Image: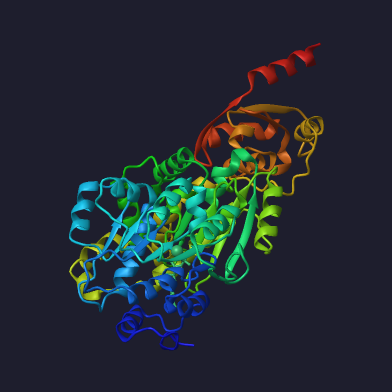
């Protein structure tokens, strides 16, 4: 099946061709012939990324008479971003029409500019419901010549509370218009619109309803709640080439996470409703142009965004509505590409995963959070890969060569390599030096008492006298026994057998060291950093003092 078989005119086919679409997608194949007949209303249910815009856009452009001044087409969609996207797509479809005027109107931008553009005569208006109503009330837009109405992402518009607005708008359109409705899901409210405002519509369902695209790999990672952010960082560090979208549940969380990541040197930008329109536009532009590689967003702000080549969708927190999971994940694996959907959950959220699995009829695979060594290794490979592939412009470098040569000539080749690697990776290696394991899955749910006992049990069996040390890192800084032994031993060079009882408290910890080994601790690791936090180690006066008293008694 080709686009020619779908009965599209020559100048539309040319536009399709210049967009590089060679074969129609399933929804396009099924919808375009019905819609093109111009005699029937239409309901199309298809998941995100299936090409719905062209499914209604191509026939819409074909059926518009661009020699008239009248507004004939009206597309209603939920968000400003989607509004701009659809307008852009329609302009591309109308590329070979003479003087097409397709005008987007949405809230948050200057209404005067939009009025000016509308006054020039819009053939097609693409609108968000609120602003459209505003313009109708100001009598700038009149719907009496409209003969095609498209409701895009109808389910989302209802989710966003546009129900009354849509009713009001549809009531003002002429009786004899056609309505084409597109939606990813078919809740009762969407049915009601179809029933009230449409005439015996043809209904097409593509793929499993609600199901996510097949070329998405679904994974979940499980950590304790307090480790959520650190787990996110590890995943980002593990995928140095990520071009990803991180979803948060609230605007506040979105702002917080993006700020924190930015402070720590990640290439991120935020998109949420608390930002001004120009900030949001700037954010989208940066992401689209890949000046930033990670977009942190709320569900509403990111709805309908169509950016090519997103490699990962990360659910920093799962959405309250399981259906949103599909909308989110659908941002990756678009236009035949593959992608990864990553959900971060705490130990109490596994039910949400099961619920979503049922909905998308796909298994979400448990995946362990990468450990420090894996991350280091991965980054090392990625870096070497980059080095090997970097083209060298010998001519340009030639004039600097004497200086470079002089600076480096006393270093052996191997050392130069080590130094270049270190320049790039020191910060990362330092951060992960004594990092623990963040996975919460293997942990059996122990009761508090048992947990304490386990914590308190000696790791090495030390028979002789010991010295107890204090460190200002505890459970809250996700210190654990394994990490403590690694930190103490790798820092001071003593062996694990020389470390005795370890007590992890919420804000600090105590560890015992075999007395002969104790003098090695403080000169080596009195201070340092652990997962980015500064720590300090002291001899515990209290413990050692009490022990002495006990001995004296
Ligand atoms: P939906 O509205 O269903 O979520 P879109 O209409 O935004 O999906 O299309 C998703 C992506 O697929 C867009 O980047 C679009 O350019 C591309 N696309 C649409 N139809 C085709 C096609 N027939 N061939 C190749 N790419 C297509
Ligand atoms: Mg769409």
Q: Is residue 391 visible?
A: no
Between 254 and 178, the one lying in front of the other is: 178
Residue 45 percent location from the top left of the image: 55, 66
Q: Residue at x 42, y 71 (%)?
A: 56
Residue 236 percent location from the top left of the image: 50, 54
Q: Quadrant of residue 452?
A: top right
Q: Is residue 281 left or right of residue 179?
A: left
Q: Is residue 4 visible?
A: yes
Q: Quadrant of residue 402?
A: bottom left
Quick check: which quadrant has ligand 1?
Answer: bottom left
Where 143 falls versus 24 (above or below)? above
Q: Which residue of the protein is positioned furthest toward the top in this rendering?
A: 553
Between 515 and 165, the one lying in front of the other is: 165
Q: Quadrant of residue 38?
A: bottom left
Q: Residue at x 50, y 53 (%)?
A: 156
Between 43 and 312, the one lying in front of the other is: 43
Between 273 and 492, the one lying in front of the other is: 273
Residue 498 percent location from the top left of the image: 71, 38
């Amino acid at each position: 099946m080709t686009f020619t078989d779908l009965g599209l005119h020559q100048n539309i086919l040319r536009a399709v061709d210049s967009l590089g679409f060679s074969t129609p997608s399933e929804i396009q194949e099924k919808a375009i012939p019905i819609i093109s007949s111009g005699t029937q209303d239409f309901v199309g249910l298809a998941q995100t990324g299936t090409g719905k815009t062209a499914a209604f856009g191509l026939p819409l452009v074909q059926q518009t008479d661009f020699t008239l001044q009248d507004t004939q087409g009206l597309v209603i969609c939920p968000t400003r971003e989607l509004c701009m996207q659809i307008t852009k797509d329609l302009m591309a479809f109308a590329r070979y029409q003479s003087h097409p005027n397709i005008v987007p109107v949405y809230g948050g931008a200057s209404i005067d500019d939009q009025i000016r553009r509308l006054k020039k005569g819009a053939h097609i208006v693409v609108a968000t419901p609120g602003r459209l109503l505003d313009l109708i009330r100001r009598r700038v837009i009149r719907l009496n010549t409209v003969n095609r109405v498209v409701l895009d992402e109808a389910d989302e518009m209802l989710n966003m509370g546009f129900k009354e607005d849509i009713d009001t708008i549809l009531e003002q359109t002429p009786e004899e218009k056609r309505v084409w409705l597109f939606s990813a899901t078919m809740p009762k409210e969407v049915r009601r619109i179809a029933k009230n405002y449409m005439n015996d519509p043809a209904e097409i369902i593509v793929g499993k309803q609600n199901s996510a695209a097949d070329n998405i790999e679904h994974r979940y990672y499980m950590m304790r709640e307090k480790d959520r952010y650190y787990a996110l960082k590890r995943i980002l560090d593990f995928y140095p080439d990520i071009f990803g979208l991180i979803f948060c549940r609230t605007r506040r969380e979105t702002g917080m996470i993006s700020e924190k990541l930015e402070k720590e040197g990640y290439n991120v930008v935020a998109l949420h409703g608390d930002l001004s329109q120009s900030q949001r536009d700037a954010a989208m532009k940066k992401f689209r142009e890949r000046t930033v590689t990670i977009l942190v967003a709320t569900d509403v702000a990111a709805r309908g965004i169509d950016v090519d080549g997103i490699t990962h969708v990360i659910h920093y927190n799962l959405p309250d509505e399981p259906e949103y999971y599909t909308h989110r994940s659908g941002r990756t694996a678009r236009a035949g590409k593959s992608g990864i959907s990553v959900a971060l959950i705490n130990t109490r959220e596994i039910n949400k995963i099961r619920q979503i699995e049922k909905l998308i009829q796909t298994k979400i695979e448990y995946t362990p959070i990468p450990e420090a060594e894996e991350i280091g290794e991965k980054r090392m490979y990625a870096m070497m890969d980059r080095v090997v592939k970097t083209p060298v412009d010998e001519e340009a470098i030639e004039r600097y060569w004497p200086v470079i040569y002089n600076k480096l000539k006393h270093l052996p080749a191997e050392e130069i390599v080590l130094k270049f690697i270190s320049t790039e990776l020191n910060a990362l290696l330092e951060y992960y030096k004594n990092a623990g394991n963040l996975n919460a899955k293997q942990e059996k749910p122990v009761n508090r008492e048992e947990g304490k006992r386990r914590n308190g049990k000696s790791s090495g069996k030390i028979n002789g006298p010991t010295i107890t040390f204090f460190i200002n890192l505890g459970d809250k800084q996700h210190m654990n026994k394994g990490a403590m032994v690694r930190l103490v031993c790798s820092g001071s060079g003593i062996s694990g057998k020389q470390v005795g009882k370890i007590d992890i408290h919420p804000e600090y910890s105590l560890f015992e060291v075999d007395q002969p080994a104790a003098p090695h601790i403080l000169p080596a690791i009195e201070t340092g950093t652990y997962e980015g936090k500064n720590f300090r180690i002291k001899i515990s006066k209290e413990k050692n003092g009490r022990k002495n008293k006990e001995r004296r008694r």
